[in-house]
Image (cartoon, grey):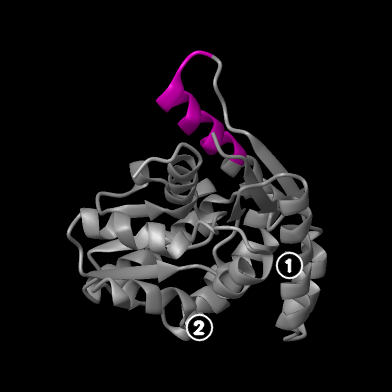
Amino acid sequence: MKTLGLIGGISWISTIDYYRQICLGINEKMGESNYGECIIHSLNYQQVINNNNRGDFDATYRLLLAAGVKLKNAGAEGLVICANTMHMFADKLEEAVGLPLINVAKATAAEINKQGLKKVGLLGTKATMEMDFYKDILKKQGIETIIPEAFDRHFVHEKIFSELGRDILKLETKAGYINIINKLLRQGAEGIILGCTEIPLLITQNDCSYPLFDTTVIHAKAAVEFALNIG
């Protein structure tokens, strides 16, 4: 089994779920008391938020790079960034650290293709929804991505930081997200990517009749397959 290096804390809430999902996934494959071999570097989320609010993404990258190097030096054999948005640095970080990086967008694209969908809605932070790093990976796999209108993007983004990342789950926020999802479905989306690792804490497949792609579960599954040399 390969040792996974998890860059977490973005937020700590979803990092807990990553660790849980990876351990459960390893145990499902191996049984008995086998669980994941993981090293976690948990960042101070406020530093990331401050950098990004200033538009200083270089400073955020340096935080991730330092974490990746520490994980490699500690014995990690592959990297998992426990956040969707920070995958804007995925290729650069993988090259700089010199370890394989399990990419959440690539893993999500593979799951969408398994279901034969060609057009999906994407929810996440403003960066994930508005920048191209995520959508370009989906496009290369023949998947068209649509995002909410500006007002709805603000709502989704703001609730991630003011509530979900603080482990605050409100029914009115859930209703707002589902309303936004329904708008995307009316625009032709065949499924919805929950492209922020906190969103699945609020909305699950049990809430919806259309396909939802829980990126935390998908990414953790890909990490398990990497650790066990599956595929």
Q: Is residue 40 left or right of residue 218?
A: right
Pick whichever, 97 or 219, lies toward us.
97
Q: Name the residue rendered at 48%, 61% in the picture.
A: 103
* Residue 147 appears in the rendering: no
First in sequence: mark 2 vs mark 1: 1
Q: CA distance from mark 2 to mark 1?
A: 21 Å
Q: Is residue 60 magenta?
A: no
Nearer mark to the viewer, of 2 and 1: 1
Label 1 neighbour load within 10 Å: few <14, some 14-19, many 20+: some
Residue at the (55%, 31%) spot, across then down: 23
- Amino acid identity at mark 2: Met
Q: Position of residue 187 (x, y in %)?
A: 24, 77
Q: Residue furthest top?
A: 32
Q: Which residue is mark 1?
A: 65
Q: Quarter of the image containing the N terminus?
A: top right
The magenta stretch is: 19-32
Identified by mark 1, the residue type is Leu
Residue 156 location (% of width, % of height):
53, 69
- Looking at the image, is 133 positioned above or below residue 215? below
Q: Please state, as top left, top right, bottom left or bottom right, where the C terminus lies in the image.
A: top left
Quarter of the image for residue 148 reads bottom left
**Main SS, magenta residues:** helix
Q: Please state which of residues 74 and 38 is positioned toward the viewer in this rendering.
A: 74
Left or right: 225, with 37 as reference point = left
Q: From this viewpoint, is residue 148 visible?
A: yes
Depth check: 113 or 120 in front?
Answer: 113
Q: Measured from the top left, where is residue 7 in percent x and y?
A: 68, 54
Locate residue 59: give its quadrant: bottom right
Q: Are marks 2 and 1 in contact (CB under 8 Å)?
A: no
Which label sits on residue 131? Answer: 2
